[in-house]
Image (cartoon, rainbow, N blue to C red):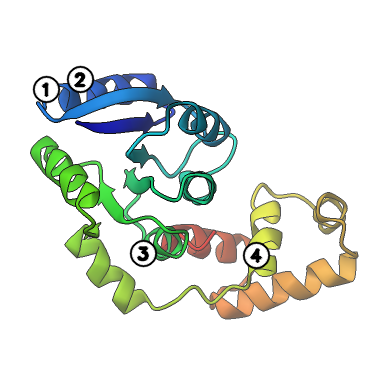
Amino acid sequence: MIRVLLVEDQAMVRGALASLLGLEPDIEVVGEAASGPEALAVALGIRPDVVLLDVEMPGGDGITAGARIREALPGCHIMILTTFGRPGYLRRAMEAGAVAFLVKDSPARELAAAIRRVRDGERVIDPGLAAAALSAGPNPLSPRERNVLAAAADGSTIADVAGSLHLSEGTVRNYLSSAIQKTHARNRIEAVQRAQTHGWL
């Protein structure tokens, strides 16, 4: 029996996935969580074979949560299942140790088959997304540029961003300027939009 932890912030989607996987004779949903921090706590308690994670959730994204779970439980297989098939998300997920990346509009039977393949040591990646990731190239932003751009995404002032990240205002301006250049944007709002579209944040 393959023991699966489902991590999805939308209760209705989580329930539907649990019901679908429950129909499989060799897959058992042994736990559910609605956020990244909750996922880690539940995983440590039940030690599942596979963790199926959404990307965008409250309290931190699924990619970061997956990396923390894998660090704590090296034998656990991390799968990303998301609505947002962005090339940057795929690259970040693979770098964080995920072994599968699927989009939610895949047929249910493909998800069950992917869980079995992952348990058997294979990598499973949505083929269309893999092609898009290769053509998009690597994330041009440094970790600090990503942090600053993400902090500025809600329209925060330079001073607010500097205060929240414990940086000088001049340093924040430099990182924003660099991020704008690297994303080929005209301003920071456009830089944020382009980075989000590519899954770089």
For the point 42% across and 58% down, the residue is 97
- Amino acid type indicated by mark 1: Leu
- Amino acid type indicated by mark 3: Pro
User: Which residue is identified by label 3?
Assistant: 87
Quarter of image, res 28: top left
User: Which residue is identified by label 4?
Assistant: 188
Residue 64, image x and y in percent? 53, 49
- Amino acid type indicated by mark 2: Ser
| Cβ atoms under marks 2 and 3 closer than 8 Å | no
Residue 71, image x and y in percent? 53, 51
Residue 146, image x and y in percent? 63, 63
Quarter of image, res 8: top left
| Cβ atoms under marks 1 and 3 closer than 8 Å | no
| Front tag of 4 and 3 | 3
Residue 105, image x and y in percent? 19, 42
For the point 39% across and 48% down, the residue is 75
| Front tag of 1 and 4 | 1
CA separation in Å, label 1 and label 4 = 48 Å
User: Which residue is identified by label 2?
Assistant: 19
CA separation in Å, label 2 and label 3 = 29 Å
Q: Is 149 placed above or below 115 here?
A: below
| Cβ atoms under marks 2 and 1 closer than 8 Å | yes
Count the marks: how many? 4
Q: Is 13 placed above or below 136 here?
A: above
Q: Nearer the viewer, residue 103 or 29?
A: 29
Quick one: SS at disc 3?
helix
Q: Point out the tag, 4 or 3, that comes first from the N-terminus.
A: 3
Q: Point out the tag, 1 or 4, that comes first from the N-terminus.
A: 1
Q: Point out the tag, 2 or 4, that comes first from the N-terminus.
A: 2
| Front tag of 1 and 3 | 1
Viewport quadrant of the N terminus:
top left
User: Which residue is identified by label 1?
Assistant: 23
